Amino acid sequence: MSDTGIGARVLRKEDKRFITGKGQYTDDINLKDQTYAYFVRSPHAHATIKAINTAKAKKMPGVVDIFTSKEVEEDKIGGLICGWMIHSKDGSGMKAGPHPILASGKVRFVGDQVAVVIAETREQAKAAAQAVAVSYGVLPHNVDAGQAMKTKAQVHDVASDNRVYNWSIGDEAATDAAFRSAAHVTKLDLINNRLIPNAMETRAAIGSYDTGSEHYTLYTTSQNPHVARLVISAFHGLAPEHKLRVIAPDVGGGFGSKIFIYGEEVTCVWASKRIGGRPVKWTADRSEAFLSDAHGRDHVSHAELAMDASGKIVGLKVHTIASMGAYLSTFSSCVPTYLYATLLSGQYDIPNIYAEVDAVYTNTAPVDAYRGAGRPEATYLLERIVETAARELKIDPAEFRRRNFITQFPHQTPVIFCYDAGDYGAALDKALELSDYRNFASRKAASAKNGKLRGVGFSAYIEACGIAPSAAVGSLGAGVGLWESAEVRVNAVGTVEVLTGSHSHGQGHETTFAQLVSERLGVDINNVAIVHGDTDKVQMGMGTYGSRSGAVGMTAISKALDKIEAKAKRVAAAVMEASTDDIDFKDGTFTVKGTDKKMAFGEVALASYVGHKFNSSEIEIGLKETSFHDPSNFVFPAGVHICEVEVDTETGLTKIASYTAVDDFGTIINPMIVEGQVQGGVAQGIGQALLEGAHYDRDSGQLLTGSYMDYNMPKAANMPHIENFKLGFTFTKCPSNPLGMKGCGEAGAIAAPPAVINAITNALGVRDIAMPATPLTVWNAMQPMKRAAE
Amino acid sequence: MPAISMKVNGKAVSGNVENRTLLVDFIRTNLGLTGTHVGCDTSQCGACVVHIDGKAVKSCTTLAVACEGASVTTIEGIAKNGTLHPMQQAFHENHGLQCGFCTPGMIMASIDIVKRNGKKVSEEVIRRELSQNICRCTGYHNIVAAVQSAAEKM
Ligand code: FES
Ligand code: FES
């Protein structure tokens, strides 16, 4: 390993601009003559729009124009789409209601956008938005996933029982048979609490139309600008792709919420033409972000786990109601299906699994992928019921898991996936050792002396990342393939530019991708530039989500580098008058076997462009290669996390006493960055378990947790102290990509919630506790015990 | 519109603002210093922290007119002659940032924490005081490590 190659803890190249205040986020960009947009949003959870009167607002100072669905329809701007078709058990297609960029005829959740005001300043737009008079006919509403199929509040005409689909996976008859012959069945009802992603940069957009070239530009906070361009072009019908440039500059976190195409961004770029080409800028307030960003999770589930007399799992049955919110967001339909139920086998050899999912409309913000997307919900369900089963069977939870681990690979689960490699026992061993599980009893006794209840909880998770191959996802209903592209341009002076379809919004691609190039070509990482996030520079790409930039994005780069190396060898051979077969390339130097002839990489690069050192009719001039990589399988990172909590019996306050994460991510390019991903993911998982939860008021349909005063974000004081947060890695190489990488971005958010809740239920000696386990929830759970003790 | 003047990063600046203009808007819009960010509308995320007369303040909750005659320092003003402030350097060396959006506010708040609590500031105190700043990416682990390491060098 070189000191900047694969496996090195290289400090990040992108840091300088962020620590000096020179980052360029969308709201930092200002275009000449720009106007400001502000959206009029529905105050009702469900209502018809009877009339919109903009006359008074239009006369307010600075107002340029005001648009509603009327103008959208005039210009034939298409509605927002959901890009993954899910079929119900009965074969019928999912019931997708219309989703216009500005609400038409009806509003379906509090915050639904009804009109846009464009003015000279943001304050003027905001003031005029308040003067837009909308008269509503209020309709009955429902915000509760569990009630959606019973309520009278019908969100969309196409779905009479609010059911988007009733989907299933696995063999129901075989699973029922396994349950009939089981020695023990554990049952659990679980709610996976609704979360609000809360990237610290809110969504923002600047749309701009050039009346001369008839060309649109959209600056936006996107995790996948090319997909945005494709959708805006093909489905909204705004402009063909060659007339639309989408730029996602520095983006302040995404966590899934910036994958999707939203109405506001499309409105800005459309409206710019409507007002004669002046740019239209919109930056969401945090309150708007709470209301209108796609939320995550929101599952209501019933699960049953069957064991034989030896404690071997023989079957799993699951029914889940998944809220989709009021509209189907871009990828929402695949989250509680192919990203969820396909993971229900976890790390265990479970011969029979059957799961049924009802996706339902509710009068709430749309729900879509949020860090982990489906996999946290699957892991929470499975790891909670496995832990509960172990307790019921009085088997140590670590031992119970080990008894059921998959140990042979490849392993075909009953729910589609074929796990290619792993060593789950090794991760468990390492986690037990790092967490000093052996001495838990003495720590528990010490906590008890201080009046605290100590508990320990496990979580053995697996996730499927990369999200591919294209043919496989296509057969499951995906509208697009999930490959990635890369272009490597070597300049004449030997410096390198990598154009990638992946998008970095905190993941550190400018460093890790450069490490790969440095390793392969022997070029200093400071001579490598990573270009991303601009559809005029990078031709096409699928963006960053699902922990795919390493396994898929870097593999594309690696394949392009293979081609660069092959071409450079031909150039080197020609210049050194040798046969290409006799050229070796190592550490940035080309040598001719058996001679002392050599050329540095930079010399070969120069020769490639000088063009007269070889016969240009045999070897094309230049050194630039492209690759589109379509993976052959998902990748399967897995690990074991162990959490210890201390609960204050007086206040119900839970403290994370220690947290141990052992993960198998395959090959790691930069351990510093990977550890950062785990720490950040675990913080979000601890947030879900202890602090965060989106609440809509049942009666009014209002979002009660609409600001940081009501929605409890994890803070520094909620996390374990540095010495109590232990990370470890195990390694099995991923066989489906040449680098052996698996993906690390979501592991923490997936693994942590059940680890924390298992620890709290262990501390309290209760069967279940709801997330978030706030002090009040925990205190209430303790009262029966206290009364019993009195 | 009242005229205001103050020092920002050592330079005298002036401008006309509305009475209601927030300091953060004056800094970002009038002065074009976009390193100071806005992450919320309830004064809780700390993305907007700057120093006013040496003290950390949330610029989203400060009126520009209230800063008449003050000396304001933003993230753009803490490196001296091209040398990063020890806190900036420590965030870099400890991987205390991912997307970078919270980072300017984190750094400005952390400098103040160390100034008030000294070189030996405990992890407990750092964590408690950083509860005024929200980061969604890092889980705070490396931010706390960065503040501890900078404290020794400041
Ligand atoms: S912008 Fe959030 S505290 Fe100032
Ligand atoms: S680094 Fe992204 S919010 Fe802190």
Image (tube, coloured by chain):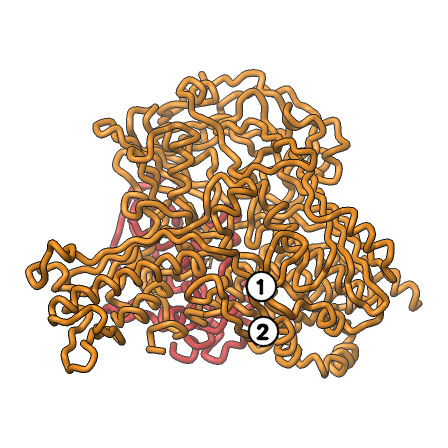
Of the pair A562 and A593, the residue shown nearer to us: A593
Q: Secondary structure at mark 1?
A: helix
In the displayed structure, A494 sits above or below A468; it is: below
At horizontal 50% and vertical 66% (from top left) the residue drawn is A734
Relative to residue A786, is residue A70 drawn left or right?
left
Q: Position of residue A507 (x, y in %)?
A: 43, 60
Residue at left offset 22%, top offset 61%: A567
- Is the CB atom of the residue marked by disc 1 within 8 angstroms of ligand 2's nearest atom? no
Asked where in the image residue B36 lies, by quadrant, the reply is bottom left
Marks counted in the figure total: 2
Q: Give the image quarter of residue A358.
A: top right
Read off the residue under disc 2: A725
Q: Is residue A256 above or below residue B125?
A: above
* Residue A251 visible within the image: yes
User: Which residue position is annotated with label 1?
Assistant: A682
Residue drawn at (66%, 67%) of the image: A406
Regarding residue B65, the answer to whether it shows in the image is no
Kind of residue indicated by mark 2: Phe
Chain letter for the residue marked with disc 2 in the picture: A
**What is the display colour for chain B?**
red
Asked whether the residues under the numbered discs 2 and 1 touch, taking CB atoms below 8 Å apart as contact, a structural biologist would say yes
Question: Where, quadrant-wise, is the N terminus of chain A in this rendering?
Answer: bottom left
User: Residue A553's spot in the image, x, y percent?
Assistant: 40, 56
Residue closest to the eye, A126 or A628:
A628
Disc on res. A451: none
Q: Amino acid at mark 1?
A: Val
A47 to the left or right of A501: right
Which residue of the protein is positioned furthest toward the left in this rendering? A612
Q: Which chain's colour is orange?
A: A
Name the secondary structure under disc 2.
strand
Q: Quadrant of the C terminus of chain A?
A: bottom right
